[in-house]
Amino acid sequence: MSYRLVQGELSFKFAAAHFVLGDTGCERLHGHNYLVEVQIYGEQDEAKNLVIDFLELKPFVRKFVEELDHKILLPTENPHLTITKKKNELFVNFIPKNKDYIFPESDVSLLPIKNTTVEEFARLLSSKLIPLFSKHPNIDAIEVGVFEYKGQGCWMKRTRDTI
Ligand SMILES: [Zn+2]
C-alpha cells in the first residue's frame, strides 16, 4: 500500500515582492500572497503508523516560509543581475536595461536561485527536504507546490532515486 500525506496550503503562506527577469527585460516590482503545499509519498512507518509526523515536517516548511515572508525576494544566481552591498543597503542593477533599485538589506531575502519564479521556489524548498529521504526509508517521493495565488503555481517532485 502507498500513501500520500499532505501538509496543506492553509498552514503555509507568505507575502513577498519580486520581479521575474528575462534576457532582455524584467517585470516591474510587484507582490503575491504565496501559498506553499508539501506532499509526501510513501509507505507507513510500521512502528508509528505514519508516513511522517506532521510535527517533524512542519518546521522545515515554516522556516522556509518565514525567511521569505514580508521580504523583497532577489535571486543571487542570475547573470543579468548584480547585487552590491554598501553599508546596510543593497544596490541592485538589471544589466540589460541598466535599471537600478536600492533596498534596505533588512527588507531583502537573497536566494540561491536563478530567478524568483514558482519553479525555482519549489526547487529550493524541495532541496531542503532531501534529508528526510535518508531519515525515513519509507518515503518514496516528496512533492512541493508553490503558488502565486490559488490556481497559478508549480509542483516539483523528487523521488528517492532521482535526488
Ligand atoms: Zn509575480
Image (cartoon, rainbow, N blue to C red):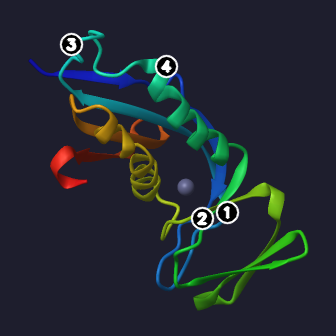
Q: Nearer the viewer, mark 1 or mark 4?
A: 4
Mark 1–mark 2 Cα distance, whole angstroms, equals: 5 Å
Residue at x 60% of width, y 64% of height: 19
Q: Which residue is mark 2?
A: 19
Under tag 4, what secondary structure?
A: helix
State the residue position of label 3: 46
71 vs 140, nearest the viewer? 140
Image point (51%, 36%), residue name: 60
Ligand 1 is found in which quarter of the picture?
A: bottom right
Q: Give how far across and how far down residue 143 sits, in percent.
A: 31, 39
Identify the amino acid type marked 3.
Glu
Marks 1 & 2, CB-CB < 8 Å contact: yes
Vertical arrangement, residue 113 with respect to residue 78, above or below: above
| Apparent side of residue 32 relative to residue 140 in the rendered image (left or right) | right
Give the mark nearest the N terminus, 2 or 4. Answer: 2
Percent across and percent down for residue 3 are 19, 20
Q: Amino acid at mark 4?
A: Leu
Please say if 104 is above or below 125: below
Q: Marks 2 and 4, Cα distance to the nearest angstrom?
A: 34 Å
Instruction: Quote the CA–CA distance across marks 1 and 4.
Output: 35 Å
The picture quadrant where one finds residue 153 is top left
Residue on which the image places disc 4? 55
Q: Indicate left or right for 158 with 38 as reference.
A: left
Q: Earlier in the sequence, mark 2 or mark 3?
A: 2
Residue visible at 40% across and 43% down in the picture: 129
Q: Is residue 20 left or right of residue 123?
A: right
Q: Earlier in the sequence, mark 3 or mark 4?
A: 3
Amino acid type of the residue tagged 1 in the rendering: Leu
The image shows residue 11 at horizontal and vertical percentages of: 53, 23
**Rounded to the nearest whole Å, what is the CA distance between mark 3 and mark 4?**
18 Å
Dot 1: what SS?
Answer: loop
The reply to whether discs 3 and 1 touch (Cβ–Cβ < 8 Å) is: no
